[in-house]
């Protein structure tokens, strides 16, 4: 036996690689898995090796199987999951694994878990013996998990006797757990450990005495964006435990990589790692937030000694999206450096920075190239209303903003500019993960953020309490604004877009909220116009206010809106009036539904074009499903689905508010049957449908069986009763408020009166007086009563229609008078008789005293006045031209010059006689006119 590095090495027989002979080779270290075949031959002392070789050679020579036909796989110095890698299984020992012995490289192309074997040194999941070097290549999107088997002395997930290189762009998770005195190791190497190519390594070791995440006999180098999270620990309650480190090595070199160390228990003088930088003049190594120490230490050549222990510190290392966002690995962890001392604005180079206190800026922060990660850490970047806070300009420029403070409070604030008071982005990408862009002002657009080209993403935090002319919170003019989470709230726009103004760009709202914003004009929450597009699939737009329209979303003539998913749109109102106004659509604008759509409540819509019964207003584009239940009209109109198949649209239609009953019907002849009355009502009695889009005639089907009180046609007394009917709404009218579609009409049947052709004596006319207005709107009376008409001037009305009063038995009745040509007459004693003609069109006389039937006279009534010489003017009513005529009566002048009515019955009697003669044949026409 040889003793090398404190271990005993045995020898064994092996078949020579070529020629079929044998050789003596060094056996694997003690406790490793025994070899198979000839390699499992009994170990013997070197002095007896020759005899064994000769015997074995003789036996094989005598074999019936020719030596040329025998095959033995090449055995490699690597074990995976307890099985030795050979030339036969190098490509299929583990799914997705391959081994190249020439380069000593294990490649993993599929996610897999490898468990250790207690027969392998340190119970390793992956083991490379014989002082061999090993490279582990974990390809992109692959996670390799290696777990060492717990042993009494030591345990490791990966154990390499030589040097270890881990590369690739995947993830390696390695752990070891020991129960004995030595300890557990996540990764252990007898030489150097190199981390390359951006691979992400999580190494942890747990031991009763010690626990190390990573152990290297020489050095550990982390380069080219590689990341190591190394944790050492020992179980709670253990009686011992003096060292617990993240990395235990002679040298830790960080060449543009990231190292996070933590050890949750340690004794005085122990620490979480050893650092001796050799490439850079100095290096920072910081413990993660899992550590419970109080400080960190920077090492430079002047401080380097044989070993330097770092005291653990809750370091500034957390995911890109913030300390508690939990988006790993989508948002990988970043090690932040303090913002350079004395920095108060100007160009900020690419890098990761965190604020150690509030920063009073002396000028705008400029981000013009590369990636800048900025953690506000509960502090403020404050411009104190002198200039904008941050400016981003560069196609390949990315600014990530988060707030790593558990308490929050980080803010980009106090900015004042023409556009973009908080952040002004001409190009590039801005990701807001946390903190706030708040209390900034822009005279023009984008009080909080003005983003022209490029991408704006809000994953968290808030844009709040900013003010601008347009786009109080955010003004997006080009590119895409994705609101995933967070809020745009309590911003104010003097004109439009209190929360967000979207021009020539797209706002995709999948989460978060737009709430509590105000626009003095329109678009309190979101204003979409000038080529802007709103895609609403989640989140909420609530509690916004506008001055006159579109408190929630304004979609202008050049804007578009689409929906899918389950968004919320509610409680957006017009200022002062408290009227709902959630989505406002310009003329001919509709909402596109781009997928399964189920909002949390119906979305209220207002349209610039108002609906009528014959012209409904579409509000969605054609789809293959009925989505009308997901929309409502903020103006109280109805919402209906129209079309079928793939052409179904939602449209706004007038909504029924009230059914107005027809006017009462009176003057129906006594004895008329109920059937005739109902027939006449069905032909002529129309109800009125009063809707949000105007009033419309509505057909009524009247039901005589509903007469209340019951009607008896045999009664001679006057009867009044009501009849009910069912209303049929015109097409294109909705009834979302469930207004009763019914009407009621009052009907009056006259009492049975005197003969339908009354005699002249029965009329007992006392006077007839005509009262008209002349050209100057002065009242002119043309009376024919005692003492009123004297010798002198008599003027006819100017041609036109006048309202004249006809008095019967002291009761006035209205009639229409159409005057003839203008004439002037003087009633002069001794002149020849003259005729004054008053022409009445459609003279309508009605009266009901003593139960007389009303009369209707159509045609022309000629009223003639004749002047006589002696003993004075006599006025004669000559009705000879009144529809066949009748005998006249004379009005004679008394001695005092006044006119004394001797009788004035012929005029009226003739009209009555003519009217009554036609009454029977025109009964129905008479009833219509009575209405």
Image: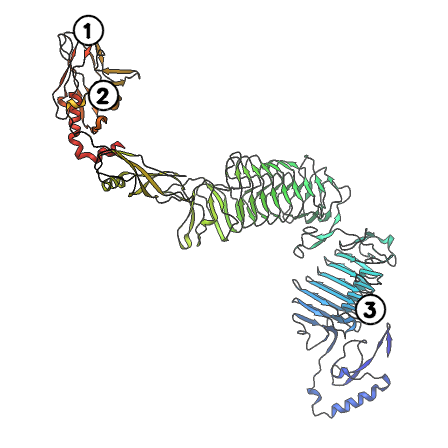
Gap between marks 3 and 2 measured at Cα: 131 Å
Residue drawn 78% across the image and 43% down it: 341
Identify the mark at residue 180; answer none if there is no mark.
3
Name which of mark 1 and mark 2 comes first in the sequence.
2
Is residue 772 or residue 364 the one in the foreground? 772
* Badge 3: residue crowd in 10 Å (few <14, some 14–19, many ≥20): some
Tell me if label 1 and label 3 are in contact, CB under 8 Å.
no
Gap between marks 1 and 2 measured at Cα: 26 Å
Name which of mark 3 and mark 2 comes first in the sequence.
3
Q: Image check: 558 left or right of 891?
A: right
Quadrant (top left/top right/bottom left/bottom right) for the N terminus: bottom right
Residue matched to label 1: 896
Tell me if label 3 and label 2 are in contact, CB under 8 Å.
no
Q: Quadrant of residue 73?
A: bottom right
Q: Image check: 498 left or right of 746?
A: right
Is residue 771 or residue 443 the one in the foreground? 771
* Badge 1: residue crowd in 10 Å (few <14, some 14–19, many ≥20): few
């Amino acid at each position: 036996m040889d003793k090398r590095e404190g271990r005993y090495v045995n020898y064994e027989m092996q078949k020579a690689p070529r020629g079929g002979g044998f050789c003596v080779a060094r056996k694997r270290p003690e406790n490793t898995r025994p070899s198979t075949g000839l390699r499992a031959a009994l170990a013997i002392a070197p002095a007896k090796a020759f005899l064994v070789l000769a015997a074995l050679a003789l036996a094989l020579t005598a074999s019936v199987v020719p030596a040329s036909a025998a095959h033995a796989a090449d055995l490699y110095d690597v074990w995976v999951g307890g099985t030795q890698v050979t030339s036969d299984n190098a490509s299929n020992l583990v799914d997705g694994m391959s081994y190249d012995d020439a380069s000593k490289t294990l490649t993993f192309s599929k996610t897999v878990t490898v468990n250790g074997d207690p027969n392998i040194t340190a119970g390793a999941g992956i083991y490379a013996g014989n002082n061999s070097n090993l490279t582990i290549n974990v390809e992109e999107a692959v996670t390799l998990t290696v777990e060492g088997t717990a042993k009494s002395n030591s345990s490791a997930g990966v154990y390499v006797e030589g040097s270890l290189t881990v590369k690739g762009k995947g993830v390696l998770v390695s752990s070891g757990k020991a129960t004995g005195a030595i300890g557990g190791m996540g990764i252990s190497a007898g030489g150097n450990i190199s981390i390359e190519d951006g691979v992400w390594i999580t190494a942890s070791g747990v031991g009763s005495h010690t626990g190390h995440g990573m152990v290297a006999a020489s050095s550990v180098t982390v380069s080219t964006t590689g990341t190591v999270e190394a944790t050492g620990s020992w179980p709670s309650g253990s009686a011992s435990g003096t060292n617990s480190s993240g990395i235990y090595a002679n040298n830790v070199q960080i060449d543009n990589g990231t190292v996070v160390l933590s050890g949750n228990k340690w004794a005085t003088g122990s620490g979480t790692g050893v650092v001796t930088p050799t490439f850079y003049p100095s290096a920072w190594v910081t413990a993660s937030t899992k550590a419970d120490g109080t400080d960190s230490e920077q090492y430079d050549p002047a401080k380097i000694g044989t070993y330097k222990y770092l005291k653990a510190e809750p370091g500034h290392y957390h995911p890109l999206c913030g300390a508690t966002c939990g988006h790993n690995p989508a948002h990988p962890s970043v090690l932040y450096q303090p913002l350079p001392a004395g920095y108060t604005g100007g160009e900020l180079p690419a890098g990761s920075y965190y604020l150690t206190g509030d920063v009073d800026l002396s000028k705008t922060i400029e981000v013009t190239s590369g990636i800048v990660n900025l953690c506000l850490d509960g502090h403020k970047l404050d411009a104190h209303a002198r200039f904008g806070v941050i400016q981003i300009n560069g196609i390949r420029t990315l600014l990530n903003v988060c707030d790593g403070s558990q308490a929050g409070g980080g803010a980009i604030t106090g900015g004042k500019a023409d556009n973009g008071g908080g952040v002004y982005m001409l190009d590039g990408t801005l990701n807001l993960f946390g903190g706030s862009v708040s209390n900034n002002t822009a005279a023009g657009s984008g009080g909080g953020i003005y983003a022209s080209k490029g991408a704006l993403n809000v994953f968290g935090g808030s844009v709040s309490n900013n003010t601008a002319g347009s786009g109080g919170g955010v003004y997006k003019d080009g590119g895409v604004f994705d609101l995933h989470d967070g809020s745009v709230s309590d911003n104010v726009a003097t004109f439009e877009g209190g929360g967000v103004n979207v021009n020539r760009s797209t706002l995709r709202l999948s989460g978060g909220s737009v709430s509590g914003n105000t626009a003095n004009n329109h678009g309190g929450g979101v204003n979409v116009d000038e080529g802007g597009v709103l895609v609403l699939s989640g989140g909420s737009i609530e509690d916004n206010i506008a001055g006159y329209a579109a408190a929630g979303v304004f979609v202008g003539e050049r804007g578009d809106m689409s929906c899918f998913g389950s968004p919320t749109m509610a409680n957006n109102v017009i200022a002062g009036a408290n009227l709902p106004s959630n989505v406002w659509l310009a003329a001919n604008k509709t909402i596109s539904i781009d997928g399964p759509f189920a909002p949390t409540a119906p979305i209220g819509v207002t349209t610039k074009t108002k609906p009528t019964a014959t012209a409904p207003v579409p509000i969605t584009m054609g789809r293959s499903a009925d989505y009308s239940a997901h929309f409502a009209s903020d103006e109280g109109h109805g919402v209906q689905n129209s079309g079928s198949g793939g052409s179904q649209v939602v449209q706004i239609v007038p909504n029924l508010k009230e059914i107005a009953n027809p006017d009462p019907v009176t003057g129906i002849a006594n004895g008329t049957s109920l059937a005739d009355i109902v027939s006449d009502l069905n032909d002529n009695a129309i109800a009125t449908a009063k809707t949000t889009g105007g009033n419309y005639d509505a057909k009524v089907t009247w039901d005589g069986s509903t007469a209340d009180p019951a009607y008896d046609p045999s009664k001679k007394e006057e009867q009044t009763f009501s009849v009910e009917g069912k209303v049929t709404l015109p097409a294109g009218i909705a009834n979302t408020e469930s207004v009763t579609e019914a009407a009621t009409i009052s009907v009056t049947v006259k009492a049975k009166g005197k003969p339908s052709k009354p005699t002249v004596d029965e009329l007992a006319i006392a006077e007839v007086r005509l009262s008209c207005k002349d050209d100057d709107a002065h009242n002119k009376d043309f009376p024919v009563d005692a003492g009123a008409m004297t010798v002198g001037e008599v003027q006819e009305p100017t041609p036109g229609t006048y309202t004249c009063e006809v008095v019967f038995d002291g009761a006035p009745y209205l009639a229409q008078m159409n005057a003839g040509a203008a004439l002037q007459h003087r009633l002069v004693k001794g002149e020849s008789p003259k005729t004054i003609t008053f022409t009445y069109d459609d003279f309508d006389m009605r009266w009901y005293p003593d139960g007389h039937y009303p009369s209707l006279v159509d045609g022309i009534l000629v009223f003639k006045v004749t002047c006589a010489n002696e003993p004075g003017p006599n006025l004669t009513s000559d009705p000879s031209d009144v529809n066949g005529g009748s005998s006249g009566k004379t009005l004679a002048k008394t001695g005092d010059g006044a006119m004394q009515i001797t009788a004035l019955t012929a005029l009226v009697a003739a009209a009555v006689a003519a009217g009554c003669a036609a009454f029977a044949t025109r009964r129905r026409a008479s009833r219509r006119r009575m209405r």
